Image (tube, rainbow, N blue to C red):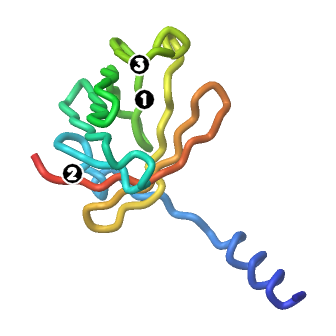
Amino acid sequence: MQDRFLASLVANDAPYTPPVPADWARFKTGRFRYLDPIYKAVTIIRTDTTQTEIDTARGMQIVYRLRWTQDGYELNQIASTFPNAAAMQGKPIKVRITQVDGNMCAYQGNLAGVILTGRIEWLGQ
C-alpha cells in the first residue's frame, strides 16, 4: 500500500509541459465531438470567432463568442435555447488545453471557479 502511494506521489509531481499553440492549431476551426458518452449527442462547430454546440438529442444549442488566448480560449455565451441560459450570461468559460494527442485534445475549463474537464475529437472541416 505504501509503495502505491509513493508511486502516485511521484507521478503527480512529474513536471507538466502544456502543449504549445502550434500543437493545437487544428482545433481552432472545424467540427468536433465530446468523447464523454454523456455528451455523445452534442456536436461542436467552430469558426474563427464562434463556437456553436448543438445537442441533437434535446434539440437545443448554445452559441459562444470565441477568443483564443496564449494557453487555450475563452467562451462567452451570446445565444442559447437551453432553459438555464440566463444563468450563464456574462460568465466566461476560460479553457486551457492540457493535452493534444492526434485528433484529440484534453481541456480544463473554469466557469466561475468550477473546474470542468474533458476531451474532444476533431472531426475535420
Asked if residue 14 lies left or right of residue 45, the reply is right
Q: Name the residue under label 3.
A: 82
- Which residue reaches farthest right? 2
Image depth: mark 3 or mark 2 in front? 3
Asked if residue 4 lies left or right of residue 86, the reply is right
Q: Where's residue 13, x and y in %? A: 72, 70
- Which residue reaches farthest left? 125
Label at residue 26? 2
Q: Earlier in the sequence, mark 3 or mark 2?
A: 2
Question: Residue 31's quadrant in the figure?
Answer: top left
Q: Nearer the viewer, residue 65 or 80?
A: 80
Could you tell me the amino acid type at mark 2? Arg
CA separation in Å, label 3 and label 2 = 28 Å
The residue carrying pointer 2 sits among few (fewer than 14), some (14 to 19) or many (20 or more) residues within 10 Å by Cα, namely some
Q: Residue at x 50, y 8 (%)?
A: 86
Asked if residue 36 lies left or right of residue 109, the reply is left
Q: Which residue is drawn at 84% across and 91% down?
A: 3
Q: Nearer the viewer, residue 32 or 11?
A: 32
The residue carrying pointer 3 sits among few (fewer than 14), some (14 to 19) or many (20 or more) residues within 10 Å by Cα, namely few
- Image marks 3 and 2: residues in contact by CB distance under 8 Å: no
Could you tell me the amino acid type at mark 1? Glu
Q: Is residue 83 above or below residue 6?
A: above
Q: Mark 1 points at which residue?
A: 74
Element under label 2?
helix
Label at residue 91? none
Q: Which of marks 2 and 1 is nearer the N terminus?
A: 2
